[in-house]
Image (tube, rainbow, N blue to C red):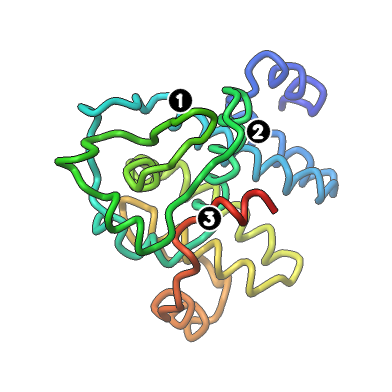
Amino acid sequence: MIGISVLKKRLEKNPLNHELWCKLGSEYHKKSLNKEALKAYYTAVDALIQIIYLRLPNTFDNLFFDNDTLGLKAFHTFWFERLVLCTIRNAEQEGVRSLIYPNAYSAIKLCDKEKYGGLLYMDRDSERLILPNLVNSVAHYLSENSIYSNYLRLIGYFYLEFGYRGKASEFLSEANVFDPFGYRMVINPISADELHKTRFELVLIKKFLMTKEEHNN
């Protein structure tokens, strides 16, 4: 069994190794270092999204994913919140001063394959406009395999262990939506009625992405 100190040293050399972050979270969890465990699990997700982000070329010929490809993913927020943080960090490192996400109406207009192709974002001076294809692409690749959905389940079970049933149901529901193998039964994490309600109840979508003013605040 690899100890915490060894895992931390390995992560210093490879901070984007999401599997090591997950193992670190597990080791913290075993030692009842719960705050550290949850942070490590979240960082595993962040590392996974960062890897996807870095692998996506910002070119017109890049693959294009329409807004319709989001499906039920549009009704879940954790993946999107972590993506926003990812784009903010990368923009800051590249000297971008303002990051602009379109609202729901603008996202429809900007999802234009003929005009923008597979572009992920557009820079003008020190501003960066995020295009819907970035959001849709990341959502697609997060659901290509079960890595992301399994991390969500880990976090969901973690919350459930400490009695946060609402938080747990959010993560387990999102896990089922992103899992390429579809819905998976789990051993009595939540009652059947609660799981059904969480999975199928449609809620109002928050603003598709934050505006420039919200970012500045």
Mark 2 surroundings within 10 Å by alpha-carbon count, few (fewer than 14), some (14 through 19), many (20 or more): many
Mark 3 surroundings within 10 Å by alpha-carbon count, few (fewer than 14), some (14 through 19), many (20 or more): some
Q: Residue at x 50, y 37 (%)?
A: 49
Look at mark 3 in the image and give the residue it sits on.
211
**Residue 78 vertical position relative to residue 132 in the rendered view, above or below:** below
Look at mark 2 in the image and give the residue it sits on.
21
**Residue 81 vertical position relative to residue 12 in the rendered view, above or below:** below
The residue tagged with tag 1: helix, strand or loop?
Answer: helix
The circle drawn on residue 54 is: 1
Q: How far apart are marks 3 and 2 (CA)?
A: 31 Å
Front tag of 3 and 2: 3
- Residue 87 in the figure: left or right of residue 42: left
Q: How far apart are marks 1 and 2 (CA)?
A: 18 Å
Residue 77 location, x and y as percent?
A: 51, 60
Front tag of 1 and 2: 1
The residue tagged with tag 3: helix, strand or loop?
Answer: loop
